[in-house]
Image: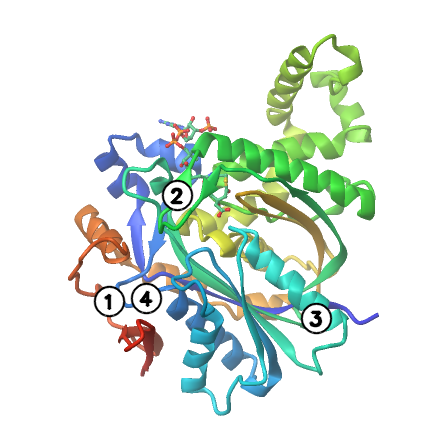
Amino acid sequence: MTSVGIDAVEIHTGKLRLDLAETFAPEMGDAPEKYTKGLGLYASSFPDTYEDIVTMGANAAHRLLKRKGLKPDDIGRIDVATESAFDHSKPVSTYIAGCLEQVFEGDFHHANKGERKFACVAGTQSIDDAYNWIKAGRNRGRAALVIATDTALYARDDPGEATQGAGAVAMLIDEEPNLVELSTEQGYGSADETDFLKPQQQFPSVDGKRSVNVYLARMREALIDYERVGGKIHPDDFRLGPFHTPFPGMVRKAAVLAYRHITRDTEIEEELAEEIGRQPRSEAFDSDEAYLEAISEYTDALKGTDRYQAWYNRTIDPTLTLSRHVGNWYTGSVHVARVSGLKALAEAGEDATGERLLVGSYGSGAQAEIHVETVQENWREEIEALDIDDRLESRYELTFEEYEDVHDAHNYDEESAVEEFTVPESEFAFDGWGRMGERKYRYVE
Ligand code: HMG
């Protein structure tokens, strides 16, 4: 059977940078360590005044198609995943196709375009749609372009303000991919939750602490559901575990719970028993409360073992490096984590061909999805083609006052006359409003 997966990827970061420890924390009256140690974040990316979800997505897609030598006729489908859309009817993918038609010969009239919404999990859902479309044989030899693009802004003074970010990830989904093959097996954890939502409003209403627990509960369900179809997961089966990363501290919490679950009834549990005992079993307790307390004590002890730390440092930590410097990109976040992990392996000179990744996607509201990916032979070439480090390095450093202005500039309810901070060059830029209230874009040479 033909393999289907991610052939290539490009990342576009918002061009402005806010240092959380040095610039943001003092103004909020917080210790810098709340960011660097607690949340695990050093900086957030923000869009300049001429950037938005369309320009970021189009810039990532433009670089991707150019690098792969593709033309519009090679693409049969453009799906955009976003939770920052500005139109209830016309999808962002039409705007992005319009941008790309400014720079490529030909057009995308033959391409099926859409927009996926389910908070941050929509990027992975779009990949799933593309996978199904190709597997069903409806693609006529063409590849799918999936773009996850968001400006993850919170209202000023909302606790979520600490985790903001903005950027886009463009991915080419194709047969016989160069980067990773996707598993047919998937696991889901999905429930009607009201932890994070945007009912007719730009910035989210968030129950932050509860959202953390909902993330953990849905991920657990998805893991169990995956095991029903993919078989029992063993921690050593996977080289990396890229998870949705609203902030690295969230993944730290999820990782230890996942490890506890997948080491239950394994030789690892037995080996650790001498040091921290065996995992509590519910049958041994009179009440749920006593069982949960014992589980929580065991998890704390597990976190402190060398065995767990070694697994975490090898499997999870490399996936968090980029996120520490960009914040939450919502739909793009888990795809940034995948690149971050593979980039670390490439930099270490490791041969990862054939290695497997346990990928955990999540969106508030709420749904988690677990699937497995297998690293393909040409993965290193694809990862080394990225210039994300240079792009992160060349971001404009905001003062706190400038950050306030940028937030206003992207706030639909504020009148703002803020000038741009950087000069657009070889990229798409916002170019004002059209007669029907549409946004217009131009390519700046
Ligand atoms: P908060 O109240 O600002 O922060 O809210 P905190 O007081 O809980 O501190 C954060 C961490 O820093 C804690 O670590 C503190 O202990 C630690 P923890 O105890 O949880 O491990 N800390 C320190 N550490 C060292 N030295 C210090 C220090 N001070 C504090 N001096 C919260 C944090 C995450 C709730 C907030 O930022 C928020 O509401 N964020 C938005 C919601 C969110 O990101 N939720 C995550 C799960 S939901 C999700 O992932 C979906 C999402 O991406 C949306 C979508 O799907 O579309 C958000």
Q: Is residue 388 above or below residue 369?
A: below
Left or right of 365 on screen, residue 154 = left
User: Helix, strand, or loop for circle 4?
Assistant: loop
Residue 51's label in the rendered image is 4
Residue 345, given in percent of the width and then of the height, sits at 60, 55
Residue type at the position of mark 1: Thr
Label 1, label 3: how many angstroms apart (C-alpha)? Answer: 40 Å
**Residue at the image position 38 percent from the left and 59 percent from the top:** 392
Mark 3 close to ligand 1, CB under 8 Å: no
**Residue picked out by circle 2:** 163
Mark 2 close to ligand 1, CB under 8 Å: yes
Colouring = rainbow
Q: Nearer the viewer, mark 2 or mark 3?
A: 3
Residue 225, given in percent of the width and then of the height, sits at 75, 42
Q: Nearer the viewer, mark 1 or mark 3?
A: 3
Residue type at the position of mark 4: Glu
